[in-house]
Image: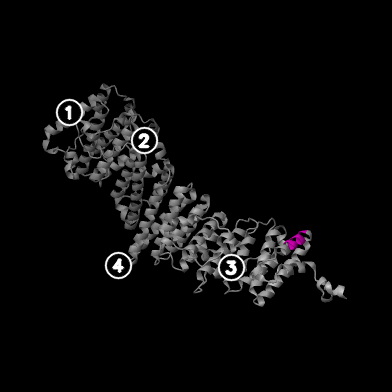
Amino acid sequence: MSKYCNNCFCCGHYLVPRYKRLVNNIFSQNPQHSVDRNNLERLRFYAIQKPEKLHKSFRYMSEKIARYLRHQNLPYVILGIKAMDDTVKSCRAQLNTFIDHYLATLHLLLEERDDLELIEHAIHSFESFCEIRQEAPNYQRDYEFFVDRFTQLCHDNDPINKIRFRYLGLRGHQALIRKTAGDELHNDVWKHMNQIIPSIIFNMKVPNQNRTQDLSITTISPEQVMITTETLTENDLNILANTILKDLFCRVHVNDIPTCIKPVLNHLDLHELWTVVDFPKYIFSEIMNSVKHHNSYKTIDLLLEYLELYCEKKDILRIKTCIMQVIHVCLMFAATNTGVESTIFSGIARLIKCLEKSFHNESRRSKASVYIQDEQQFQNAVIDGIREFMEKLRDYQIMEVMHIIITSLPIVNQDNENKKNHLSDVNLKFQLLLLKTMQKVATTYQAKHHDESTSTQTTFPHQLFDPLIKMMSASVVEIRLIILEILILLIDKRHYADKIRKIRMPKDISQLNLSAATKTSHLVDMPFMKKYGPQFLPQLYNCILMNNNTKDIFYTIYCLMNIVTLEVNDQDILVDIIHFCFEIQSTLLTTIDEDYKKLSKINCNCIHALIAAYFNLMSKLYGIEAFSAHVDEVIQSRELSAPHLLPPNAFQSTTKESLSKSLSMECLFSEKIVIDALKLSHYDISRFDRIIHKPG
């Protein structure tokens, strides 16, 4: 009997299965001594030799931990979870055989809501498990409990350990994202974004300038984030939350972007965070920096959808303006860092629709309404966003956006009689605002191309050129003037405009300080003008003969005619424009067209002055001596016959009336005399043998 007693057969020791004895031996008599490593190695070796016993070993270990937990024997609980964690790492190849028992044990530990130490060890173990890559995912596995629990921890309000609980919750979400987000065969995490993302944003705030560099952290291992001290601050929460948000959007697929963006928008709405616009701008700047660049358009598209919803809510304007400012941030990122796609161009068209709707909403409000100022702030935000976005684009993209803007305008080329019926004050205001935006962008475009590297052919694709020249004869003076200014800015690559803006009659053109580059041939522009000249000149013809032209419009037309001639620097184009001037003079004297009979005497004289100044400049600039002599003779004869009509500096006068008195209505130059002058200078006049039909 002593033999049996010594071998403990009497108490059934050898009747206990070996896997249970190995598990029991892991737990040392003193839990403070940690896991018995020798016995743990024996358990691992046994599991490798008999993998079918691994499932039973884990089930038994889980039962022991649960029993210790019920009896509040916390040291043995912590010892057991460490042993389980080590076993998971060493037996990862057979993970699917025992993982359910492992996750059930973590479930029990996380339910201990007030025990920070247990929760910390559970999340540390969960992080270790999430680092393991599985070859064959278990599609039946559900992480819903873990998402719920981590979300609760992220919103914890414990008066003492609030920051530490929230930090643990963020770590849990981070581990789960890394476990499942990158696995194309297991998309479980994406259906929980409505809980995960608000939890992350809840713990974020706009960082101070001096802490911005801390946000460069992109990965945190479980060993780095184990809580060993109580020195955590809210800034640590912000850094970790920022890291998780960027990590999530780095992994997101284009089809899952809406799943991630919509919870962000809902959270900002629910907590009324739009009005403090720095925070949503910070959130979306981080998102745009993290998401794959070729997918960034999807974020902008979702924000535009959200803005369109708010455009229907007429009394929530401040939020609408803030959303636009966020879109502005995203557009600037897309223009600078990504290839702008057609979807973003369509987004510009959608912004213009929102802008137009805002103008109509403003017109329907009373002038005393408190919402008018908010509408105007929204309109300014849209315009600033479009303008700054365009300034960051490449040349061909700028032209594409300008085309979108100009085709978005309502029809403006209406007769004056019908203008009130077809063009309301709201539409006019809307059109002028968009055209002024185009004018500012054209100014930036001109400044970028001081090296004359861009041809007119690339500057004016026909999609943009056609609507621009059609609007040259718009009935509204303000629109006509802006269109002419835009054309000058886009054509004037050598910055002549400031020197030849005023209608003057200098006998010595050196006073104009035109650069020596004037005589440089610009071959790339010739085919464009020869192709589109017959389309351009008729519209310019109609523009010159509009009865409501102002002094500024005559100055701008004069400038445009000179710049077109100088930039192309082609004899045929010069001859065409000279003949074009003859046609206008002939029309003023002989036409029976009722429309042009309405031209006032003031306007007729202004047109003659414009033509005289153009002839004077071109004849002297191109050195056509006979032509120049004839111009001087005509002007001198006018001065002698009617000196009171040509006061000093008449063509720089400040009023249209004084400008018109500078020349009489008589035709200053006959076609025959000028052609003879050109012959004498051996200039090519072969194109004068054809009669150009009156434009228009």
Residue nearer the viewer, 373 or 111: 111
Residue 527 point in image, percent of width and height: 40, 32
Residue 27 point in image, percent of width and height: 70, 69
Q: Quadrant of residue 465?
A: top left
Which class describes the residues within 10 Å of circle 2: few (<14), some (14-19), or many (20+)?
Answer: some
How far apart are the alpha carbons under marks 2 and 1?
Answer: 37 Å
Residue nearer the viewer, 366 or 410: 366
Task: Answer with left or right where residue 46 lies relative to residue 146.
Answer: right
Residue marked by disc 4: 368
The kind of residue tagged 1 is Glu
Q: Residue at x 66, y 63 (%)?
A: 85
- The stretch of residues the image draws in magenta is 41-48
**From the viewer's perspective, is the residue at label 4 or at label 1 nearer?**
4
**In the displayed image of the protein, which residue is found farthest to the bottom?**
71
At numbered mark 3, what does the secondary structure look like: helix, strand or loop? helix
At numbered mark 2, what does the secondary structure look like: helix, strand or loop? loop
Q: Earlier in the sequence, mark 2 or mark 1?
A: 2
Task: Tell me the quadrant of the picture where the N terminus can be found.
Answer: bottom right
How far apart are the alpha carbons under marks 4 and 2?
Answer: 51 Å
Which class describes the residues within 10 Å of circle 4: few (<14), some (14-19), or many (20+)?
Answer: few
How far apart are the alpha carbons under marks 4 and 1?
Answer: 63 Å
How many numbered discs? 4
The kind of residue tagged 4 is Ala
The kind of residue tagged 3 is Glu
Q: Can residue 541 be seen by looking at this rendering? A: yes
Q: Earlier in the sequence, mark 4 or mark 2?
A: 4
Residue marked by disc 3: 120
How far apart are the alpha carbons under marks 2 and 3?
Answer: 66 Å
Is the Cβ of the residue at disc 4 closer than 8 Å to that at disc 2? no
